[in-house]
Amino acid sequence: MKEECLGNRWKEKVENYGMMHIFMLYPKGKYDAKDTSFQNLMNVLFKNEHSAEEKLEILRKQFGIKVTETMEEEVEEMSHICMYYEQEGKKAGLTEGMLIGEKRGMLIGERRGKILTQTANVERLMKKQLSMQEAFELLGIEKDMQEKVIQQFNHSNTTENKSNI
């Protein structure tokens, strides 16, 4: 096995040839047309900001890499893989977001339903000549729920009065 430098800067020791390594890459930032750093090279290769053709052109012009036919095929394949994982990530995020939204919606609906139910119960008791406070005590409604029932009661009466005008 021999090293073939396709660019003009990177060299590797012969004893490292053929060694299997696993690299985890997390490219940061955006592509910079003036930056020839390794980090920017990783942005070009592993981010989905450019088409395969654009990536190959950047490798040639900006990084001075002699692009072979094999590299062209690999960049094309890698671009498809990047797009695939980006799509899968978006789907997973959307699904998770919808589930979270559904749960939140159910909780809000449940709370709203409790408030409306308690408000209706209090209104029925008030029609039987009990005060609001007596209705709260009879129904065992806690202080924080009492405040919400009062708000709902006031809102309902305000809305009702406006529709009667």
Image: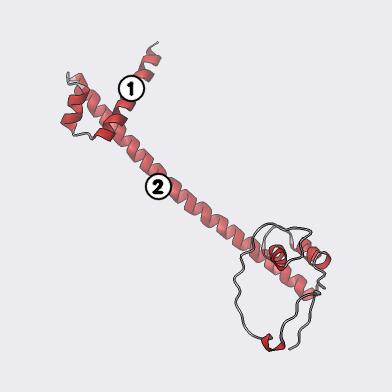
Q: What secondary structure is found at the residue carrying circle 1?
A: helix
The amino acid beneath tag 1 is Asn
Is the residue 135 above or below the residue 106 in the image?
A: above
Q: Nearer the viewer, residue 154 or 163?
A: 154
Residue beneath label 1, please?
Answer: 154
Closer to the camera: disc 1 or disc 2? 1
Which quarter shows the C terminus? top left
Is the residue 68 above or below the residue 62 in the image?
A: below
Task: Please give the label number shown on residue 1.
Answer: none
The amino acid beneath tag 2 is Lys
Q: In terms of image quadrants, where is residue 151?
A: top left
Q: Residue 57: x percent and y percent?
A: 81, 64
Q: What secondary structure is found at the residue carrying circle 2?
A: helix
Q: Residue 119: x percent and y percent?
A: 27, 28
In the picture provided, is 64 more to the left or to the right than 31? Answer: right
Q: 10 Å neighbourhood of mark 2: few (<14), some, or many (≥20)? A: few
In the picture provided, is 107 more to the left or to the right than 25? Answer: left
Q: Residue at x 33, y 38 (%)?
A: 111
Furthest residue in direction top, as rendered: 165
Which quarter shows the N terminus? bottom right
Task: Please give the label number shown on residue 103.
Answer: 2
Alpha carbon separation for disc pair 1 and 2: 29 Å
Q: Residues at badges 1 and 2 in contact (C-beta under 8 Å)?
A: no
Between disc 1 and disc 2, whose residue precedes? 2
Q: 10 Å neighbourhood of mark 1: few (<14), some, or many (≥20)? A: few
Q: Residue at x 52, y 52 (%)?
A: 94
Q: Residue 87: x percent and y percent?
A: 60, 58
Q: Residue at x 20, y 29 (%)?
A: 136
Q: Residue at x 61, y 80 (%)?
A: 21
Q: Nearer the viewer, residue 24 or 156?
A: 24
